[in-house]
Amino acid sequence: MHRFSLAAAPRRPWKNGGGETRELAVAPPGAGLDDFDWRLSCAQVANGGPFSAFPGVDRSLAVLDGAGLRLECADGATHLLSAESAPLAFPGELAVTATLPGGPVGDFNLMTRRARWTHHLQRLRLCGEWPLAADADLTLVYCAAGVGLDCWLAGGRELRLAAGEGVLLDALVDGAATLMAPQVCKVLLGRLWRC
């Protein structure tokens, strides 16, 4: 189990030098942008421009706040992401250019090196209980917005996550974890599998 917080995350320059990111977690520990197995980060995007290229990496991107992010991809696709839309999954080698129709946005990135890991990221709007499926090698829970979220683990352990906090859980056992949101909470839920 590994807890992390946006407020305590170290700042790193973007791979293309166009901004900065806050690294929430990376494997192996201390890995750089060219040799990580997987990486979680948040960025404040203040200006439009091209995304950094990550050959051999699969990416999922979710907008956390702001008026939205428009992505134009070299394959001809255009995507408009908002703080309510599903995360966008795309290959890291795809050329992507971002524009900001309504000003700066905050975003969340999950990246996995294709030869070593795969992943799925989804956005949830929780109020009440949500059992976590025991179907991944790592399970990511990130409280994106709301008054907070409780994560109940095996043996009666409880984790309290405030907005901007998250946890990575090693392989779960069936019925071993449940999320509980006393009020509406926006959550990013990720599942990661070793190849």
Image (spheres, grey):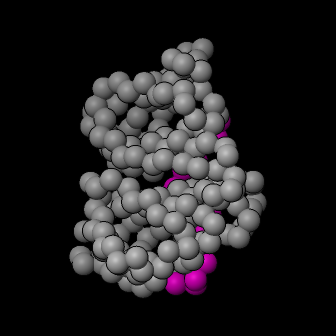
On the question of residue 7 being in view, the answer is no
Horizontal relation, residue 38 to residue 139: left or right: right
Residue 148 image point, x, y percent: 38, 38
Q: Quadrant of the N terminus?
A: top right
Q: Residue furthest top?
A: 155
Q: Is residue 146 left or right of residue 114?
A: left
Q: Main secondary structure of the magenta part?
A: loop
Identified at 63% across, 36% down, the residue is 137
At x 45%, y 42%, the residue is 189
Image quarter of residue 76: bottom left
Q: Is residue 183 visible?
A: yes
Q: Is residue 174 above or below residue 24?
A: above
Left or right: 102 as drawn, with respect to 9: left
Which of the 4 image quadrants contains residue 180? Answer: top left
Q: Position of residue 85 (x, y in %)?
A: 28, 55
Q: Is residue 20 above or below residue 1?
A: below
- Residue 15 rendering spot, x and y as whole percentages: 61, 78
Asked which quadrant contains residue 168, the reply is: top right
Magenta region, residue range: 1-18
| Residue 50 image offset from top left, x and y in percent | 46, 83
Q: Does residue 103 sit above or below 156 in this rendering?
A: below
* Residue at the spot 39% in from the left edge and 65% down from the top edge: 106
**52 sits to left or right of 113:** left
Q: Say which of 163 and 194 sits in front.
A: 194
Q: Is residue 114 magenta?
A: no
